[in-house]
Amino acid sequence: MYKVLFAASEVHPLIKTGGLGDVAGILPTALFKLGWDVGVILPAYPNCKQQLKNLVQVTSLSIPSVTTPVIILKGELPGVPVTFWLVDSPRHFNRPGNPYIGENGQEWPDNADRFATFCKAIVHGFVTYPNLDWKPDVIHCNDWHTGLIPPLLDSVANRPVTMFTIHNLSYQGVFPYATFQELQLPNHLWLSSALAFHNQLSFMKGGLIFSDWLTTVSPSYAKEIMTPELGCGLDDILRQRFKNLTGILNGADYDRWDPVQDSLIEKPYNKESWYDKVKNKLALQRQFHLPENKKIPMFGFIGRLVTQKGIDLIIKILPKIISEQIQIIFLGEGEEYYQSCLETLARKYPEKIGLSLGYSETLAHSIQAGVDIFLMPSYFEPCGLTQIYALRYGTIPIVHKVGGLADTIIDATPENLDRELATGFIFNNPTSSELLHAIERCLHLYAQPYLWQKLILTGMAQDFNWKNSAKRYLELYYKLLQSRSTIE
Ligand code: ADP
Ligand code: GLC
């Protein structure tokens, strides 16, 4: 049986800040169900050590450049069929809360050392000094935190094949040259054809250049990152690798994100009982002390409060849309500036705006179930999961036509409505006026219950099952393993 080690910096339900956690929480299980032996490895944050069962130390590594021993732990998560591995280096990972930033809202100053240690431990523990009796055929890396794995493995004999998935190209793990020296990375990696990026160290480049295959999380984003507009300075490298770059759309974990079996919402419902959705709306209005009214169109936003998500576009038009009979709920955390703009607006319009700053898995579910319309005007969106979840909850997404948003939502044009294809509202350019226009189109349809119901039911019938995406990953793993065996 082939083995894959899936390496990520966050994995739901152990630790999560966004969609990467969702993907790493379910894709490994989908691969397992297709017959692979799957291990998941992540740093030993306190949350992970608390939640995993039967944790045992399997090896202690002494890694040059890391002054203290690094332990590999192995454990289980009840109900999840894959094996969990943790890289335990307390001085790097024994910190509660967000995995990347401290309580002051700033990135941990030693993030380069933390994630380099994570990568080195994986390479040493599983490949170069195989202290463990479980040797992966494939190492599947995710985002910059795992970017040093492919370059560190590159010249190792009989190494596993490597896959690197880009979840978000804009977070690259770039650090000064001095960090490259402190981390004692091999000198030959200091080249612009390796880790050097404008005279700085780039973890992301390591993944992009040295992995055997690259994937990203939607077909449209795969094309977009090869352009200067969305390539974040790395588009030339991606263009060079276009033959080994595949866009595979993320799926949804419908065991967690389906209103018919969601224990976190007020009233379960499905396509047959979709009208029960309104009970969730009333509960949400109550929770946020907004007037309880079934008819009033209710908007929602759930996401990291960062520029990527187009939150500024919403803030700009909020005073205008709020003059209509509407309500809107925000759930998010992130940049101070956006938080304070939203606080000011929520204070000004307490009867119309519900605001929750922070992270709440429960509230994310209640909002998906309660609101009528989901706003996602992201400037760029590698895939986006919240709009996919919204569809299953009969919540109509309004999205910018970009990345995974363009690949998952079908615009409610009259023709698409007629053919029962339409699932949401799409606008072409990320401007507040285009967003406003899309909102107006949406409210126009909301006022026509027959058409609105059709839109809801088409959305609820969409199926973004993980199985299909997992099969695509497996095809690529097999292809890589096959080409390796031909070389050998
Ligand atoms: P991204 O990965 O860019 O943050 P996605 O749409 O792929 O965007 O995934 C976001 C995930 O994080 C979803 O599961 C969403 O429900 C969750 N999420 C984002 N912000 C919050 C929050 N403040 N509280 C709870 N869940 C959140
Ligand atoms: C990233 C992207 C998001 C994607 C998620 C999971 O955080 O911003 O679009 O859905 O990763 O792949």
Image (tube, rainbow, N blue to C red):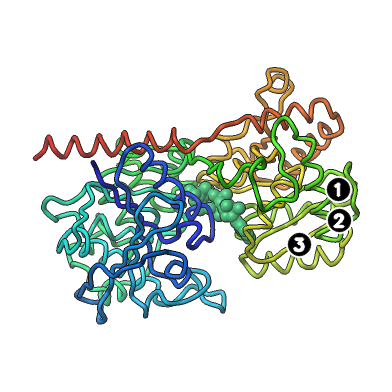
Q: SS at mark 3?
A: strand
Above or below, 458 relative to 231? above
Amino acid carrying mark 1 in the image: Ile
List x then y, in percent, for residue 410: 63, 30
Residue at the image position 67 percent from the left and 53 percent from the top = 264
Mark 1–mark 3 distance (CA, rounded to whole Å): 15 Å
Closer to the chain start, of discs 1 and 2, is 1
Residue sitting nearer the eye, 250 or 41: 41
Residue sitting nearer the eye, 77 or 334: 77
Res 326 label = 1
List x then y, in percent, for residue 64: 19, 75
Question: Is residue 307 at least partly visible in the picture?
Answer: no
| Mark 1 residue crowding within 10 angstroms, few (<14) / some (14–19) / many (20+) | some
Q: Are marks 1 and 2 in contact (CB under 8 Å)?
A: yes
Q: Is mark 2 within 8 Å of ligand 1?
A: no
Residue at the image position 68 percent from the left and 18 percent from the top = 419
Mark 1–mark 2 distance (CA, rounded to whole Å): 7 Å
Closer to the chain start, of discs 1 and 3, is 1
Residue at the image position 43 percent from the left and 58 percent from the top = 77
Residue pointed to by mark 2: 352
Q: Are marks 1 and 3 in contact (CB under 8 Å)?
A: no
Mark 2–mark 3 distance (CA, rounded to whole Å): 10 Å
Q: Are marks 2 and 3 in contact (CB under 8 Å)?
A: no
User: In the picture, residue 124 is in which quadrant?
Assistant: bottom left
List x then y, in percent, for residue 41: 35, 59
Residue pointed to by mark 3: 355
